[in-house]
Amino acid sequence: MSENKATLKKGWNFDNSYVRLPQSFYTRQDPIPVRSPEMAVLNDAFAVSLGLDPEYLKSREGLAVLAGNEVPDGAEPLAQAYAGHQFGHFTMLGDGRAVLLGEQITPEGKRVDIQLKGPGRTPYSRRGDGRAALGPMLREYIISEAMHGLGIPTTRSLAVVTTGEPVFREQELPGAILTRIAASHIRVGTFQYAANMGTSQDLRAIADYTLQRHYPEIEADDDRYLNLLRAVIKRQAGLIAQWQLVGFIHGVMNTDNMSISGETIDYGPCAFMNSFDPATVFSSIDSQGRYAYGNQPPIAAWNLSRFAESLLPLLHHDEDHAVKLAEEAISDFPGLYHGYWLDGMRSKLGIRDEEEEDETLIKDLLGMMREHRSDYTNTFRALTFDRVEDTGLSEAEQFGKWYERWKARVEAQPGSWDASHELMRSANPAVIPRNHRVEEAIEAAAKNGDYSVMERLLEALRHPYAHQESQIEYCSPPEPSERPYRTYCGT
């Protein structure tokens, strides 16, 4: 009886379905133990929502699981196989530094992956060590939780533990392991792997599994595989629009980093835009700007075309007809994306109905913001509270004319200004994870062991639409000395 009570207190509730797929999709792989793990940060409230006991996770036994030193009851650890286009070049990939412990069924009946990131080498590691450094793992923790606060579909972070072992990159760094929670880790690259390296049965197996897990409402459709393509296109169109609306730049939109569930996944060289410029790119390895802010929608369409190609054998037995079906589905992406984006921009400006002039009004504002290097987040925040002097545009003659057009547009719609301001408050965050603030928090934790800076930042980011007094210190853009900012793939 005491053993059952202990199990219930821990909260593990695994039901592992991915392991029932053909074995070509994964390799069974236990995490490799580390020397002396210690808890760096634990997401207590999130743990409870998963059905896990935070006090247990902080205990020696729980810490051993999060560090990969022990495998919890019911887990079936594995490393997933997948492929992908990286900067346009196709290659075989896989979980080179990640191990999926299993699938947790939450108290609400939701199925989620529990994955350790940085638990040692796997068969897909190639020349890597399978480990991760503390800084990048803290970065993923901060950004993924910020995205959750912004209401954007995302993987989330349960914990980061230090390993007591160094990792060697350009320099010696403290090692760490992140526990990542996802709706699943099925990627566009998973389908590319099945289509290019597997059999037709493998492709059908992963498609049927994906339908059952993420799109059960279309699982019984006669055209279920075509409808799967359409459903993924629709989710991705909505997701990318949400990225654009808050100025998020993923930085490495390879096909292996596009989740079939529609979540944002793999926070490597990501960052948020300060001054508005569609050409903004932060990643040190993206020298051509392939994944710049303004390129994210067309790159998403390109990635989805690769997904469609992988599905061709399932769309129709006649290849030419299958291609036609796929092309018709992909052609929907620009309109879907544009509709989501335009609706979101209307909300950011307090516009509650639709007029043809709206897009011109929006683009005229963005054009001025680009010309005057206006801060993206703060400009909309200033408009939300009618503080024109804080937009960075108040001295521009064309802005005064735009401002009058905007006022007239809002006043012409049914309802009050209060309703428009309330809509703007809900669409324009007070705070984003400013790059310089994220780096400040990571440096304090990774170099000095001071996690209080990170904790305060996370608290400010938890409710970004609250517009609280305590958030003001996190609203300022970086000083000129803190620019230009560069990000690096987390390792």
Image (tube, rainbow, N blue to C red):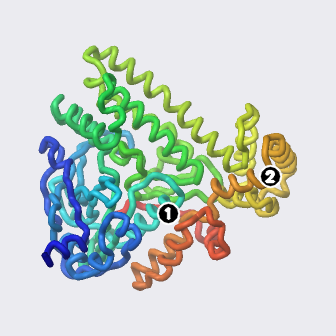
Please indicate, yes or no, whether residue 156 appears anywhere in the rendered image. yes
At label 1, the amino acid type is Ala
Q: Which residue is mark 2?
A: 417
* Residue 405 location, quadrant: top right
At label 2, the amino acid type is Trp
Residue 420 drawn above or below residue 310: below
In-image side of 416 versus 336 (left or right): right
Q: Which residue is mark 1?
A: 146
Q: Residue at x 16, y 49 (%)?
A: 19
Residue 448 drawn above or below residue 403: below
The residue lying toward the viewer, choosing from 422 and 83, is: 422
Circle 1 SS class: helix
The residue lying toward the viewer, choosing from 458 and 5, is: 5
Where in the figure is residue 134, as x and y percent of width and height? 35, 73
Where in the figure is residue 465, as x and y percent of width and height? 61, 62
Nearer-N-terminus badge (2/1) = 1
